[in-house]
Amino acid sequence: MDFRYSEEQLALQDTLQRFITRDYDFERRRALARSPLGFSAEAWARYAELGLLALPFPEEFGGLGGSGVDVMAVMEQVGQGLLLEPYLSTVVLCGGLIRDAASEPIKRSILPQIAAGKLQLALAAYEASGRYDLARIACTAVETGGGWTLSGRKAVVLDAPSADYFLVSARSAGQVSDPEGVSLFLVPRNAAGVTTFPYPTQSGGRAADLQLTNVSPQAVIGMPGQALGLIERAVDAAIAALCAEALGIVTALNQATLNYLKTRKQFGVPIGAFQALQHRMAEMIIAAEQARSMAIIAAVHVDVVDVAKRRRAISGAKAYMGQAARFVGQQAVQLHGAMGVVDDLIVSHYFKRLTMIDMSLGDADFHLARFSDAPRVEA
């Protein structure tokens, strides 16, 4: 099997890379992270023009019908450029849920708007008491004669401050942690009873906690009480995308570190001439190549229907990626010396984003446990 990117995927990466070099350099990124919005509205519109926002959606809804590997190609560049725009939340997570589970009218209403850059969404699926457990939901959904009423609190909703809609998971039946009885709802940001508590993340992005008080959602996504599997599938796709983003960062960190070893001099020679540092650089390159293999495994398993096979592959990739990212990040910081932790150098920002990726949607320990507990599936 050929695991290299196709010509179209390479062309897409090249276009995005040229945009980053021209319009999204490190200083621009730092300014955007400090801005009220937290990202560039102009860049988001540019992504729409390039077709990035339409990539994973069917052509009948204004999309390009892209695969998990197509998304990987984009997310690898997102990592190298440290892009702040809510691509993961809106396109991969919520866009994927709408594509796979929503009714036909909702798909026709929302997916073209996402593709055009006119609509952003955020997934409110996690709660403070549940940590990474998507089934541990205390937020309630009560069906009344006029529809549904949602009440509860959601934690760390990524990119919530800029979202126009939230996809909110709530328990409509059963007890906390039951796999059955989880429903998913489309909630407008301005719906009565929705209160957001926004804050910046350590890597420059934005998130918020949500308080829902007798909220009337706009629509139910999928069948009531049967949404957990749909949410888990969308989260698996997002994990694969995060692995690709981490791969892009690891690649960029290795290049930055190699350049530093070639230019930083000590005792009259570049420090890259010292054998001990050459060995450490070689180990970083090996870790990056192994990370690329794991990111590919995750990407090609995104659309696998067999839940156990998909989950085992993606958890294995996320677990390894967390370990490799920590190793490469720590080595890069150490090889840069004191410069590796200063805010003026991109290395520290790469390392912070890698740390955030490891903690997002399940850290390395969580996915290692999930991988080890999963039944072994024959290829």
Image (cartoon, rainbow, N blue to C red):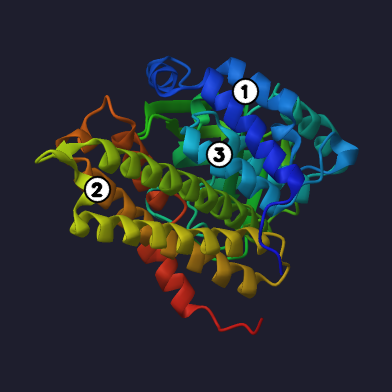
Whether residue 218 can be seen here: no
User: Image point 60% across, 20% down: which residue?
Assistant: 43
Mark earlier in primary sequence (2, 1): 1
User: Image point 72% across, 60% down: which residue?
Assistant: 303
Kindly identify which residue carries mark 2: 272
Q: Dots 2 and 3: beta carbons under 8 Å?
A: no
Residue 41: name its quadrant. top right
Between marks 1 and 3, how big is the CA–CA gap? 15 Å
Give x and y (percent) for residue 177.
49, 63
Which tag is nearer the camera, tag 1 or tag 3? 3
Residue at disc 3, secondary structure:
helix
Q: Which mark is residue 77?
A: 3
Q: Which mark is residue 44?
A: 1
As drawn, the residue found furthest toward the left would be: 267
Query: Please, is residue 377 above or below residue 286 in the view?
Result: below
Mark earlier in primary sequence (1, 3): 1
Mark earlier in primary sequence (2, 3): 3
Residue at disc 1, secondary structure:
helix
User: Image point 66% across, 64% down: which residue?
Assistant: 301
Quadrant (top left, top right, bottom left, bottom right) of the N terminus: bottom right
Residue type at mark 3? Gln
Query: Please, is residue 5 above or below residue 14 in the view?
Result: below
